[in-house]
Amino acid sequence: MDILSLTRKIRFAKLLFLSLLLLFLVGIIGFMVLEKLSVIEAMYLTIGTLTTVAPFELHDEGRLFSMFLIMVGFGLIAAMAAFIGNILMDVNGLALYRRRKLQKKIDKMRGHYIICGHGQIGQIVAAELHQHGKEIVVLERDEHAASRCREEGITYLTQDATDESALINAGIERAHSLISLVNRDADNVFIVVTARALNQDIFISARANSRGVENRLYHAGANHVVSPYASAAVRIIQNMLRPTVSDFLGSAIDNKEELRLEMEEILVPKNASFAGKALMDSNIRNEFDLIVVAIKRLDGSRVFNPSSLEPINIGDTLITIGPQANIDLFLEKLNYKDSR
């Protein structure tokens, strides 16, 4: 059974239900007219007639009308019972119904994140985005991995991300970002190429599993490429050479139970009261206890460790660090809608 067949069955079920409801209303009105009964009595008599129970003595007109109701109602009830039994016994039909319901949910999403692959890295990425309240769609063809998404309450499709139709079903045209984290480099390259062709504006981050693949992914259309092994090697070296710095960053960013610090990038909107002012006059540090560690200009240039006299312009991106509650307060004051 395919989605189209399931849709037809659902329409048929609605038609049966409406037919039964209409027959019930006809029975009530008919008995009220023919037998001069009240609404409650007519409802009682109609239900009794449709269930082949004769609760009242009827006149000849009422008896003829009852026979009509019994013949028509018996056919409709038998058809409804057979249909429900068929649906309950059809496991594929139930699965397709859940899939159709899930697809409707995805079709309503805008600016969401598509994660291709729910392996070790994909689980961490999905959990972090889910924790931050982002809408996510995971594409994972492995049933066991997909079941993890179901347990964690994450929206997922059990489809192959290398299939163009899977990306379309995940809402690639409306998504803000795509993260390709499958195990094979060739699949990651193909996913990036396909995603870029379907949405020219989407932000694409991809995983490179082996040396030399980074350039291929960038050429394919990725905005950002990460090599887990290279990142892990750099982290190990930093731990060895600068253990105190690494411990601080680890406790400040990774372990949210201690310092509870977050790094955030904030686009300066047109309505920002501090736009055009120097950093020291923005009161970001004094009012919100946030540290601006860098500023990214519209032309792509970056100002690291900006001085207090550094101007903040509309369209700049501020890289801030501080408690999440303070960041949220700052964003609320800016009436900032996170478009990432």
Image: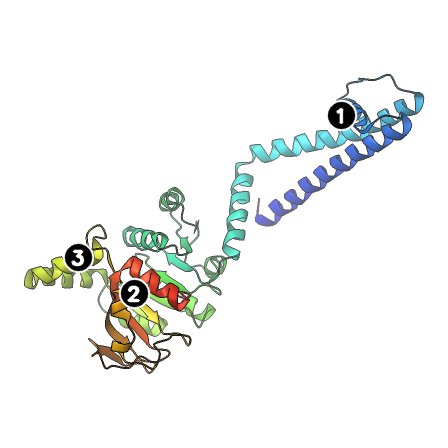
Quadrant where the N terminus lies?
top right
Tell me the SS state at disc 3: helix
Where does the image place residue 3, in percent across and percent down from the top left?
57, 48
Tell me the SS state at disc 1: helix
Q: Which residue is mark 3?
A: 250
Q: Is residue 64 left or right of residue 92?
A: right
Q: Which residue is mark 2?
A: 264
Quadrant where the C terminus lies?
bottom left
Q: At x 37% / y 57%, what residue is drawn?
A: 116
Q: Which residue is mark 1?
A: 47
Q: Amino acid at mark 2?
A: Glu
195 shown above or below 82: below
Kindly indicate the quadrant of the structure image that contains residue 265. Answer: bottom left
Q: Is residue 25 left or right of residue 210?
A: right
282 shown above or below 119: below
Q: At x 40% / y 53%, what residue is drawn?
A: 138
Q: Is residue 189 visible?
A: no
Kindly indicate the quadrant of the structure image that contains residue 10. Answer: top right
Tell me the SS state at disc 2: strand
Observer-nearest of 289 and 150: 289
C-alpha span from label 3 to label 1: 70 Å
C-alpha span from label 1 to label 2: 64 Å
Q: Is residue 254 left or right of residue 171?
A: left
Q: Amino acid at mark 1?
A: Ile
